[in-house]
Amino acid sequence: KAGVTQTPRYLIKTRGQQVTLSCSPISGHRSVSWYQQTPGQGLQFLFEYFSETQRNKGNFPGRFSGRQFSNSRSEMNVSTLELGDSALYLCASSLGLNQPQHFGDGTRLSIL
Amino acid sequence: GENVEQHPSTLSVQEGDSAVIKCTYSDSASNYFPWYKQELGKRPQLIIDIRSNVGEKKDQRIAVTLNKTAKHFSLHITETQPEDSAVYFCAASTRGSSGGSYIPTFGRGTSLIVHP
């Protein structure tokens, strides 16, 4: 079974731009969660989608948004990028409620 | 919301020694506690998990214990090997504010260094 796939692996953007990250979950997994990982704050929950619906959202500004498609693939969008948005963005998929999460390799976003 | 404290932040051991990493959580409603291992430049990988109806779980050299009363859980690695060197994260899952799913709150991580 293929693992969680995230694209692109690396991105360099400038302040004020926007970016879209993509995540393809493990086949059969309907839950997709997004996390931001930084040295200072660790792993922080962004949001979780299940069957195209956002079920929960972490404490991030509205510039961070996401969506999930009918095939469970998910995208995350960050608008008006700030220097502090530089981080590794991880996607994880699972079968559902309180089930083990499987992470992708992440997208490393650098803001100049 | 949930708060997870993880200690120590760095742990250095000799090959063959045991390593113990401890986490405490604040929300008594948390009921799922996974542990992840993240090697440098790689994705976090689930190594073991425990649910609130179980006090201990073991998988070869790795074990996790849970004390619901004290709200703490620990990861135990025996006979450590250099390839165990990585950052280990604990997490506690509790229902999100919308009630629709469980959200994991992660500890800040422990950097385990196993010296040959």
Image (tube, rainbow, N blue to C red):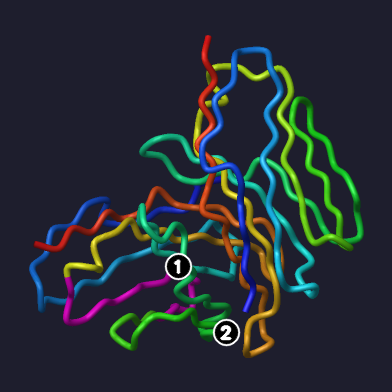
Disc on the earlier residue, 1 or 2: 1
**Depicted B64 relative to depicted A48: above or below:** above
* Image position of A40 (left or right of B109): left
The boundaries of the magenta stretch are A67-82
- Work out whether disc 1 and disc 2 sit on a shared chain: yes
* Residue type of the residue flagged with mark 1: Trp
Name the chain letter of the residue that bears numbered label 2: A
* Image position of A92 (left or right of B25): left
Q: Quadrant of the N terminus of chain B?
A: bottom right
Pick the front one: A111 or B10: B10
Q: Is residue B63 magenta?
A: no
Which residue is rendered at x = 71% and y = 29% of the image? Answer: B77
**Depicted B83 relative to depicted B37: above or below:** above
Disc 1 marks which residue? A34
* Disc on res. B72: none
Name the chain letter of the residue that bears numbered label 1: A
Which residue is rendered at x = 71% and y = 66% of the image? Answer: A98
Disc 2 marks which residue? A55
Residue A111 image position (x, y, % from top left): 14, 63
Which residue, as the protein is rendered here, is positioned at the far top?
Answer: B116
Element type at marker 1?
strand
- Gap in angstroms between the C-alphas marked 1 and 2: 12 Å
**Depicted A111 relative to depicted B23: above or below:** below
